[in-house]
Image (cartoon, grey):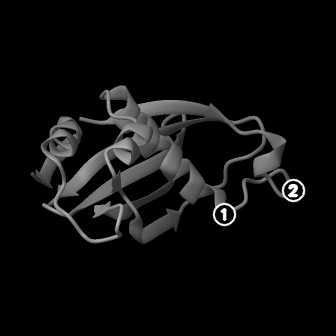
Amino acid sequence: MYFECQYRVPYADTDQMGVVYYANYLVYFERGRTEMFRSAGLPYSELEKQGLFLPVSEAYCKYQASAHYDDLLTFRSWIAELGRVRVRIATEVRRADEVLVSGHVVLGCVNSERRIVRFSPEIIAVCRKFVAEGGEA
């Protein structure tokens, strides 16, 4: 299942040509996955209260077309792989039906001492809601 949310590009996200600055797409990926977790009833703030953190260990972007000031974008996110201590979340940034940027991040799970730990049953349950066909759960 995919999760989608929308975002209108403000001037602050663009360069002098009105094109979205390339590094902002990683921020867009974060917006998509944060809202995905929130929509399933598990905001990151709740994870942090439990002493769990999901740091990014890998990020990949493939740029296909540019977004511009005032474009209405859709962030489509899903779980591409789910393991015991890491998850790969794929995201597409779209303008209508056009994919502008696609990519993924890999998140690990660490405790407040920054030691790698297994995902809690709660995190696994949330992730399973968004596993795309072919994703490992």
Is 9 placed left or right of 40 in the picture?
right
The answer to which of 16 and 52 lies nearer the viewer is 52
Q: CA distance from mark 2 to mark 1?
A: 13 Å
Q: Residue furthest right?
A: 16
Residue 5 lies, in percent from the top left, at 48, 31
Residue matched to label 2 = 17
Is 59 placed left or right of 106 in the picture?
right
| Disc with the residue nearer the chain's start (2 vs 1) | 2
Q: Residue at x 13, y 61 (%)?
A: 84
Residue 76 lies, in percent from the top left, at 41, 40
Q: Residue at x 70, y 36 (%)?
A: 71
Mark 1: secondary structure: loop
Residue matched to label 1 = 22
Callout 1: few (<14), some (14-19), or many (20+) C-alpha neighbours within 10 Å?
some
Residue 30 lies, in percent from the top left, at 50, 50
Residue 120 lies, in percent from the top left, at 17, 48
